[in-house]
Image (cartoon, rainbow, N blue to C red):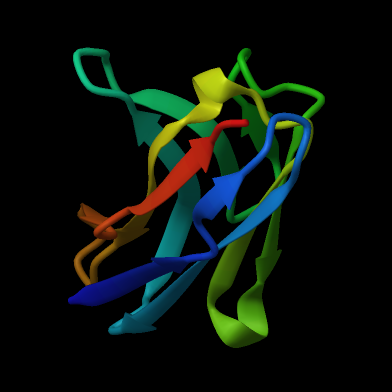
Amino acid sequence: QVHLVESGGGSVQPGGSLRLSCAASGTILNIIDTAWYRQAPGKERELVALISSDGSINYGDSVKGRATISRDDAKNTVCLQMNSLKPEDTTIYYCRLRQRDRWGVPDIYWGQGTQVTVSS
């Protein structure tokens, strides 16, 4: 089992910045990728950013140019730096980790989420 804990959410004014962190603990084996998703009420879950084990990175279209995902393998932590925040960025952000178990089968783990509110 893997336990994910997100932190860093909060309230900021439009144009502000936040840095979200996702700390993983437990039985960490062969990580495939770690990602941040968000889901606003009544909307589909949206990919914000993803970083693969080989270092490749993808961003959702709505955050390109404003988000930076990074990884600290020593601390089993993935961070998401969000700049130029907009009111439409307001929602809960979730960390998701995907890894292969000891038999090579992919497992997916989700954190509890952290609230980001962008408002003047």
Q: Position of residue 23 (x, y in %)?
A: 46, 75
Q: Nearer the viewer, residue 78 or 117?
A: 117
Q: Is residue 13 left or right of residue 29?
A: right
Q: Nearer the viewer, residue 26 or 118?
A: 118
Q: Is residue 11 left or right of residue 85?
A: left
Q: Tell me the residue at 56%/73% (across/down).
A: 77
Q: Is residue 70 left or right of residue 47?
A: right
The answer to whether 16 is drawn above or below residue 21 in the figure is above
Q: Position of residue 35 (x, y in %)?
A: 48, 45
Most distant residue in the front direction: 120
Q: Is residue 66 left or right of residue 63?
A: right
Position of the C terminus, as image quadrant, is top right
Q: How many numbered dots are placed on residues in this image?
A: 0
Q: Tell me the residue at 53%/31% (across/down).
A: 48
Q: Tell me the residue at 56%/31% (across/down).
A: 119
Q: Nearer the viewer, residue 93 or 57?
A: 93
Q: Position of residue 102 (x, y in %)?
A: 23, 73
The answer to whether 87 is drawn above or below residue 36 in the figure is above
Position of the N terminus, as image quadrant, is bottom left
The answer to whether 79 is drawn above or below residue 49 in the figure is below
Q: Tell me the residue at 74%/46% (across/down).
A: 17
The answer to whether 115 is drawn above or below residue 45 in the figure is below
Q: Quadrant of residue 65?
A: top right
Q: Position of residue 78 (x, y in %)?
A: 58, 63
